[in-house]
């Protein structure tokens, strides 16, 4: 099974196929309608067992609401076009009001799919269709729990490493652009936006993996590793926010840079980049570079709007402040951003 997963198709596809097969087999064995159960099994496969269990507890009552609405509208209006519309709209509205959003799709599908079979025995139809929906829901949850539990550690590690290098490449390129007089960079705006989306995806993978380990065995070292990357991604998201401010500054004046100022900024940028990648065997941050930037900012505090040069200094000093305690960040893994 693992060879098939790695060679041809993803784990979620495999689990969907298995869930559909088991669901259809059970329904045929019990002489129950297959369609509702299979639809439910397909749409309720989740990335993790934790999601399946949590959302499954919401989807069943939502499906019951959809079935009840379908039977009531079919009884009052018959099998007409307006019946489908009313059943779908009322089901979605009720799910929203009852805070059952996670089951809204399954409930709406149940509602519209039950109408064609509703003739005279409305209560029997309701119980039968709701039972098949429960079979599909239970089967997909069980398959998601037992079969091919997701392992995102390698994916998280690789993407976190890539994101770290992407951030430093953008940072270095942007500093050179600013020193060469390029106030705004359209190209880097798009690159930074893609980096932000990538960091969001990695953060989601960390959340999925930590949730999955509530229901499966794991090694302590694996847990620490994911905690570490979760904190790293949180830090990179903060750094990327300030990098975006450098890419799209609120002021457009073109500053004049002395050779000393350029040297200070390049030296500080190189040292900050080193600290993004590692905390071992680093030279101390140049105090003279930091002090010259702080002194420049002190002279601008009375202004309503900072000139671009001072704005750049402010963002560089903020990035330095975020990285200053990075040694603690590496040493103490945690899942709580507040602990940073």
Image (tube, helix red, strand yellow):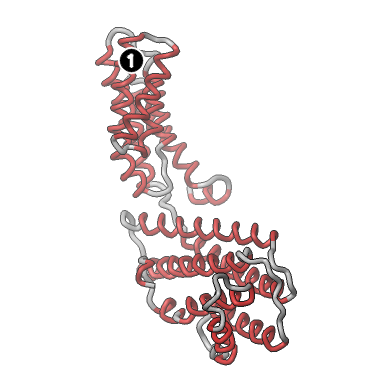
Question: Residue at position x 62%, y 82% from top?
Answer: 270
Is residue 15 positioned above or below 226 on the image? above
Where residue 73 appears, as percent x and y from the top left, is 33, 15
- The residue where tag 1 is placed is 73
Question: Residue at position x 33%, y 25% from top?
Answer: 66
Is residue 51 positioned above or below 120 on the image? below
Count every numbered label the image shows and give the total: 1
Give the farthest residue toward the right.
Answer: 180
Task: Please tell me which residue lies in front, 152 or 267.
Answer: 267
Is residue 25 visible in the rendered image? The answer is no
Task: Please tell me which residue lies in front, 102 or 289.
Answer: 289
Where residue 138 appears, as percent x and y from the top left, is 32, 36
Q: Quadrant of residue 247?
A: bottom right
Circle 1 sits in a helix, a strand or a loop, which is it? helix
Where residue 118 appears, as percent x and y from the top left, is 34, 12
Q: Quadrant of residue 128?
A: top left
């Amino acid at each position: 099974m693992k060879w098939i997963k790695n060679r041809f198709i993803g784990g979620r596809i495999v689990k969907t196929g298995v869930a559909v097969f088991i669901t259809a087999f059970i329904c045929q064995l019990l002489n129950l309608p297959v369609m509702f159960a299979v639809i439910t099994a397909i749409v309720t496969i989740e990335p993790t067992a934790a999601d399946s269990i949590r959302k499954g507890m919401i989807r069943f009552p939502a499906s019951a609401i959809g079935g009840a609405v379908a039977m009531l509208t079919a009884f009052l209006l018959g099998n007409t076009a307006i019946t489908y519309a009313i059943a779908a709209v009322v089901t979605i509205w009720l799910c929203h009001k009852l805070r059952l959003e996670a089951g809204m799709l399954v409930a709406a599908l149940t509602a519209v799919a039950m109408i064609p079979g509703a003739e005279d025995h409305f209560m029997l139809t309701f119980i039968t269709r709701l039972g098949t929906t429960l079979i599909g829901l239970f089967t997909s949850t069980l398959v998601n729990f037992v079969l091919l539990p997701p392992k995102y550690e390698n994916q998280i590690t690789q993407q976190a490493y890539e994101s770290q290098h992407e951030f430093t490449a953008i940072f270095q390129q942007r500093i050179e652009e600013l020193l060469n007089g390029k106030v705004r960079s359209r190209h880097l705006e798009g690159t930074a936006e893609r980096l932000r989306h990538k960091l969001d995806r990695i953060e989601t993978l960390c959340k999925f993996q930590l949730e999955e380990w509530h229901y499966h065995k794991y090694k302590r070292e694996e847990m620490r590793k994911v905690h570490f990357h979760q904190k790293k991604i949180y830090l990179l998201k903060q750094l990327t926010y300030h990098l975006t401010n450098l890419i799209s500054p609120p002021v457009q004046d073109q500053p004049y840079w002395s050779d000393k100022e350029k040297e200070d900024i390049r030296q500080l940028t190189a040292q900050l980049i080193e600290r993004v990648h590692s905390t071992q065997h680093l030279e101390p941050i140049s105090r003279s570079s930091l002090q010259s930037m702080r002194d420049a900012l002190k002279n601008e505090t009375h202004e309503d709007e900072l000139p671009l040069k001072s704005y750049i200094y402010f963002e560089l000093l903020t990035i330095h402040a975020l990285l200053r305690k990075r040694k603690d960040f590496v040493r103490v893994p945690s899942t709580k951003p507040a602990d940073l």
